[in-house]
Image (tube, helix red, strand yellow):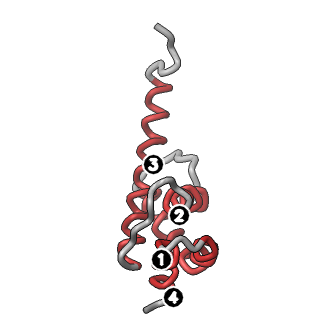
Amino acid sequence: MGDITQLLFDIRQGDNQASRLLLPLVYEELRKLAAAKLALERPGQTLQPTALVHEAYLRLVAGPEEQNWNSRGHFFGAAAEAMRRILVDGARQKMSQKRGGKLQR
């Protein structure tokens, strides 16, 4: 079993130390994934790849949901989905402000 897969298994078992050890191993790959996601966005995006990686990692590892990754590929798929949701949430927030999202009826 690879280092990343073993750490994912340890996180699933409740080992808090494993989540701290996981980030340095997956950081570069997550950063490349974030840069690719941001390259598809409209110009003028204020979110940087580093911030996107950190936000996605927090949602994945420190989130209220139970982490249940079967493999390294499953983890990176979940990371890609988390990044997509972060970008969608940001776009929705921007559009709501543009359309008078703070108006009181």
Q: Are marks 3 and 4 in contact (CB under 8 Å)?
A: no
In three-dimensional space, the C-alpha distance between marks 2 and 4, rounded to whole angstroms, equals 17 Å
| Three-letter amino acid code at the position of disc 4 | Asp
| Three-letter amino acid code at the position of disc 3 | Leu
The circle drawn on residue 87 is: 3
User: Of callouts 2 and 3, which one flags the residue occurring earlier in the amino acid sequence?
Assistant: 2
Residue topped by disc 1: 8
User: Of callouts 2 and 4, which one flags the residue occurring earlier in the amino acid sequence?
Assistant: 4
Considering only vertical position in the picture, is 62 above or below 9?
above
The circle drawn on residue 68 is: none
User: Of callouts 1 and 4, which one flags the residue occurring earlier in the amino acid sequence?
Assistant: 4
In three-dimensional space, the C-alpha distance between marks 1 and 4, rounded to whole angstroms, equals 9 Å
Q: Are marks 1 and 4 in contact (CB under 8 Å)?
A: no
In three-dimensional space, the C-alpha distance between marks 3 and 4, rounded to whole angstroms, equals 29 Å
Residue topped by disc 4: 3
Q: Nearer the viewer, residue 14 or 37?
A: 14
